[in-house]
């Protein structure tokens, strides 16, 4: 089972306080991103229904949101210590 993420070592107490603040911030960001992703999915569905094809711009935007959401979830669940964007880097394609 080497493919599973390994638990992080226990951080110093000061670092945990900063992480808690970041976690609260990114929980709110996650909520906003989730709604944005839902609106994007509905928009893509409507474009597909009315034009018969998928919008490449919406698909690219949705893919970026999905990668960003993954980055936030990994941070919130302690899979990684890398702080998501805008503190860290936006996930590459």
Image (tube, rainbow, N blue to C red):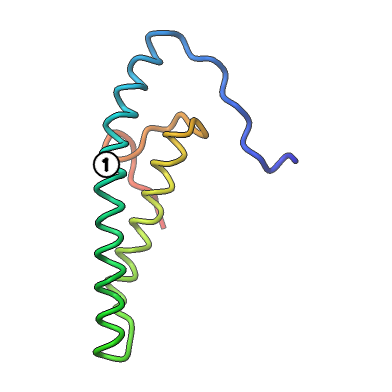
28 shown above or below 41: above
Front-most of 73 and 71? 73
**Residue linked to disc 1:** 29
Query: Horizontal placement of 65 versus 73: left or right?
Result: left
Residue 82 figure quarter: top left
Q: Residue at x 33, y 36 (%)?
A: 88
Q: Classify the position of the C terminus by image quarter.
A: bottom left
Percent coordinates x, y for residue 42 in the rendering: 27, 71
53 shown above or below 29: below
Q: Classify the position of the N terminus by image quarter.
A: top right
Percent coordinates x, y for residue 33 in the rendering: 28, 50
Q: How many labels does the image show?
A: 1
Dot 1 lies on which element?
helix
Percent coordinates x, y for residue 60 in the rendering: 33, 67
17 shown above or below 79: above
Q: Which residue is drawn at 38% across and 62% down?
A: 63
């Amino acid at each position: 089972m080497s493919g599973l993420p390994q638990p992080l070592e226990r951080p110093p107490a000061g670092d945990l306080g900063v992480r808690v603040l970041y976690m609260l911030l990114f929980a709110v960001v996650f909520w906003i991103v989730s709604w944005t992703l839902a609106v994007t999915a509905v928009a893509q569905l409507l474009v597909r229904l009315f034009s018969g094809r998928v919008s490449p711009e919406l698909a690219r935007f949705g893919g970026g949101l999905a990668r960003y959401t993954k980055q936030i979830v990994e941070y919130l669940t302690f899979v990684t210590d890398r702080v998501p964007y805008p503190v860290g880097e936006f996930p590459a394609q």
